[in-house]
Image: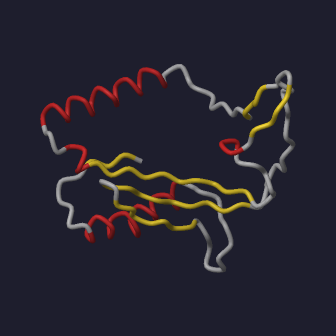
Amino acid sequence: MLTYKIQLFQKLLPRDPDQRAEYSNAILRLSGENEYVSSKLIMSDDAHFLFSGHVNKQNSRFWGTQNAQLIQDTSLHPLNTSVWCGIHAGNLIGSNFFENDQNVAVTVTAERYQDKIRNFLVPGIWAFSLADIIFQS
């Protein structure tokens, strides 16, 4: 018997490989120009957590003599929460939930994401006394 892992795939657009190569080359150029570029880099991301009991694919394995090609049905609008976090040289900036005034999860929109940047990332930058930064969202 073998162990199998659930696989999720993100659809890549035709321009994605070129954009990723351009970004990698830009970071390599910056690293060549400034050895401290990694200490100036701030990255942020958001993650979504489902309350439905949906299993995280990273921790889900099943055993079988062949791949069962399992399909897991999920609700179109499952109850969930979304969290934003930034990281700089091993320091966390955040984490902060995407919620309304009643602490109910809300959809992550461009406006709400920009609000997190203004209200949590910028003060985090000030808290770490950072001057010259490179931000990657």
- Vertical side of 116 occupied by 23: above or below: above
The chosen color scheme is: secondary structure
93 left or right, relative to 70: left
Q: As drawn, which residue projects farthest toward the bottom? A: 102
Quadrant where the N terminus sits is: top right
Where does residue 30 sit, x and y in percent of width and height? Answer: 20, 35
80 left or right, relative to 95: right
- Vertical side of 87 occupied by 64: above or below: above
- Vertical side of 110 occupied by 116: above or below: below
Number of marks = 0
Where does residue 50 sit, x and y in percent of width and height? Answer: 73, 57
Q: Depth check: give the residue in front, 68 or 122.
A: 68
Which residue is at a point 56% across and 67% down the rendered structure image?
Answer: 97
Where does residue 120 sit, x and y in percent of width and height? Answer: 40, 68
Q: Dividing the picture into quarters, in which one does residue 20 lie? A: top left
Which residue is at a point 70% across and 32% down the rendered structure image?
Answer: 7
- Vertical side of 74 occupied by 114: above or below: below
Which residue is at a point 68% across and 72% down the rendered structure image?
Answer: 104
Q: As drawn, which residue projects farthest toward the front? A: 1
Where does residue 121 sit, x and y in percent of width and height? Answer: 37, 63
58 left or right, relative to 109: right
128 left or right, relative to 114: left
Q: Dividing the picture into quarters, in which one does residue 35 lie? A: top left
Which residue is at a point 75% across and 30% down the rendered structure image?
Answer: 4
